[in-house]
Amino acid sequence: MMTNTHRANCANAQGPGCKCSGCGGSQHGWQGWTSLAADRPEKRDDRRRELKEKVEEDRRSGRQKFNAHNREIYFDLARLDITDYLWAADGRTRINGRLPRDVEPTSMSSDLGRMDTLAHQVMENPWYEISAGIDSLVRNKADAREVKKRLADHTWCGLLVALIQLIEKINKTVELLTDTAKQFITDALSRRFDSGLPRLVTDAVIRLVVDKVWSALARLLEAHFPLLGTDTLRVLRMLAIFTCPSVEHHPEVYKHAVRPLMGDGHEIITDEIKTHVVTLFSAWWRRRAPEALA
């Protein structure tokens, strides 16, 4: 799906629950899925066949099993539906059968272009300063590496969900970068992230992440990127779904990204896959985290 200096297994989300110290989760999943969205349709068709062949069925009844494996498979099929939508909704001219990527300026006329901008500017680019900042905060190399691995445990998808909730609540762009809004994001990360080190260090890491992301958001606003509105919310939801290392362990992603996207008027996820996702995950959430269905 994608090759670069970042570990391919993490970029392509080949392992659920991936905890990559190389990117701290800031580049997990979305790099591979967006590359697949820009690739030729037959690439996605091949991936769909591969996934469907892996669905597990009960030998006696022939019915699909209600297990973690099938939840993972069908959620990847939902992600694949999103890549199909991104391809079909992008009006740019194809080059050798592919959508153009890594060109300046990035197109703001398509969801894939908006996603590329948000992912690069808010997640990928700030990571280098965040990583260096962690190395300064935590002088022991092994501890610093562990902190980065722990950041990969749902921190970035959690940040995206908090941003989604924030944008849903406000009406004016000026309200987005207030101290109150920043504290909302900080509190959301504080509830989930644990560095494994003293609380003072954990809080310092959270402040570092939020400060760098906040600076990135401010730069996007200065560049007149439309951070408010339904288009951005839709893109943020798709990005959270691509980024999350394991949705079945993150009820907020299911509630604030997956469910709204399945109900989106653009029919991004097909009825077939939607039915399987709802069936498999509703049973799971009723037992584990009913708030995901509230």
Image (cartoon, helix red, strand yellow):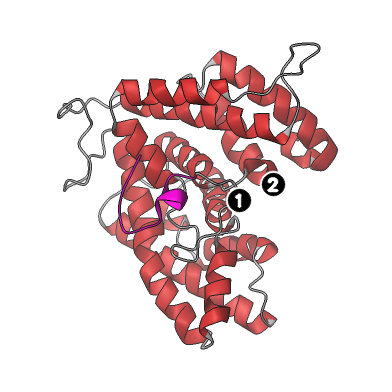
- Label 1: state its secondary structure: loop
Mark 1: give few (<14), some (14-19) or many (20+) Cα within 10 Å.
some
Locate residue 198, reporting x and y percent.
68, 83
Task: Tell me which corner region of the image, top left, top right, bottom left or bottom right, holds residue 56.
Answer: top right
Name the residue at 50% across, 47% down: 243
Q: Residue furthest bottom?
A: 139
Name the residue located 55 percent from the left edge and 46 percent from the top edge. Answer: 15
Classify mark 2: helix, strand or loop. Answer: helix
Q: Which residues are magenta?
A: 1-13
Is tag 2's residue or tag 1's residue first in the polypeptide sequence? 1
Q: Residue furthest right?
A: 287
Q: Main secondary structure of the magenta part?
A: loop
Disc 2 from disc 1: Cα separation: 9 Å
Q: Cβ–Cβ below 8 Å for labels 2 and 1?
A: yes
Instruction: For marks 2 and 1, give the one nearer the viewer.
Output: 1
Q: Circle 1 is placed at which residue position? A: 17
Q: Is residue 163 visible?
A: yes
Q: Which residue is mark 2?
A: 249
In magenta stretch: residue 251 = no
